[in-house]
Image (cartoon, rainbow, N blue to C red):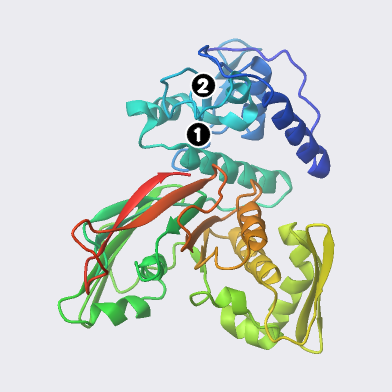
Amino acid sequence: MTKRWTQPIPQRRFGRQRAFAEEQERKTIMGSGQSNSRADFTDATKRTLALRAAFRCSNPSCGALTIGPGAGNTDIEMTGTAAHIYAAAPNGPRGTGGLTDAQRRAPLNGIWLCARCARLVDTNAGGAYPLSLLRGWRDLHEARIRMEHGGVSRPFGWIHSIEILDDVWLAEPTTVRFSRCNIFIGDNGMGKTLFLSLLSGLASPSRIMERASRPDSTVHAAINWYDPQPRRAEFRAEGEQLHFSADGTAVPFVPQPYRIVHLAPDSWRDAPRDVRELGNMVGLDHWVVRKLIVEMPEIVGGAVKRAWVEDEEIHAQYVRGSEVVVDRGPHRGLDAIVALEVLVALAETYARTQPTLLLIDALYRGTAAEFDHATELLSSSTRGFQTVATSGRSSPPLSPEWTVTRFVLEADATYIPLKRWARLVQDEA
């Protein structure tokens, strides 16, 4: 297919101007009623999606260039497609989600893919490619393009899935797919913290070995990711035996394929104010932590507007609703809002040089305002890392960017037994 571009390239929007434009677009499209008609993209929307993707396929395992010279001296050949996330038509792949025609035509409902990947994601009603996964592809791809356009080359990586073949808490082997924002929901004691330890098991297998050392206990899992080529690492722990393989070859250990940012369970809410203590907790020299704290507002762009170190202690000024709060009290730990933004700044910095996964245990243990701040911060389309969080709340308020996986007690169990008590059920937020 050959197309000649005749439209001028639209002017770029930055910062507040772009945010204002997107908000106006949302307000405009919300006014239309839903119908049974097909909601195809306009040429302008297709062009917007192509330009924002730099004419490259947004599938992290592909990244193919979708534009080039055509047969004639002035021809341009385009092989890319502006694909719908929610379906263009009723009963289409992934359904319409109750969106209006105008919402399904909007750029926010689109992703730029090559022709092959566009067909792939719609196979079997799109069941293997849920909306949160496609939105994650798009947002991480655009974050990478944004960095490259600004003169910073960001290596691309995507943690695609984990296959849990055996663990003390798991009732049956399960494969869990990851989008950009992921939350795992279950009651206390269901295994949420044990699940997070699997994701950090390649670099830090100590917690896995603790439970594998119990009688008749095995921990066996495989992690699949793209860098951008498909990769696989597997580990199996039983007794005092620990085995690793990388792409099918046995190895003594797997060089860290992605960076994990993770504090001990729930300790992110008790992040120390002392800059040296915080450095020890996150594995950084205290001078590096000082630099990170000062630059945190610029890196994160969140509620924290100013941060500084005084007498070895971290202080910050942040916005909570209409109130400006100064976090510099006598209490030893940082406020939860400040502590979370420290972790986000750390993850963003690591993500500039390697694929990064932020693990947050007990995300919804504080106030509703803290949870809203956290989910909005983490689901921002500018984030260059993936997030995996846990929550004890059964139905936390979430935007569609989040993939929800639930810990479900085995049907035959009326209480949590000693072994194999939970199944994982993944659904859409």
Instruction: Classify mark 2: residues with Cα within 10 Å, few (<14), some (14-19) or many (20+).
Output: some
Residue 184 locus on image (x, y percent): 43, 57
- Helix, strand or loop status at disc 1: loop
Is residue 99 visible to us here? yes
Is residue 59 visible in the rendered image? The answer is no
Query: Residue flagged by tag 2: what amino acid is it?
Result: Thr
The image quarter containing residue 378 is bottom right
Q: Is residue 320 left or right of residue 348?
A: right
**Furthest residue toward bottom:** 311
| Percent coordinates x, y for residue 33 in the rendering | 62, 19
Residue plotted at (63% across, 65% down): 367
> Which residue does the image show at 79% across and 78% down from the upper left?
315
Q: Position of residue 98 (x, y in %)?
A: 52, 27
Q: Which residue is mark 2?
A: 79
Q: CA distance from mark 1 to mark 2?
A: 10 Å
Kind of residue at disc 1:
Ala
| Residue 236 versus residue 129 in the image, above or below | below
Q: Which residue is mark 1?
A: 64
Q: Are marks 1 and 2 in contact (CB under 8 Å)?
A: yes
Label 2 sits on a secondary structure element that is loop
Residue 385 percent location from the top left of the image: 57, 55
Relative placement, left or right, of 1 versus 368 is left
Q: Residue at x 56, y 26 (%)?
A: 99
Total numbered badges shown on the rendered structure: 2
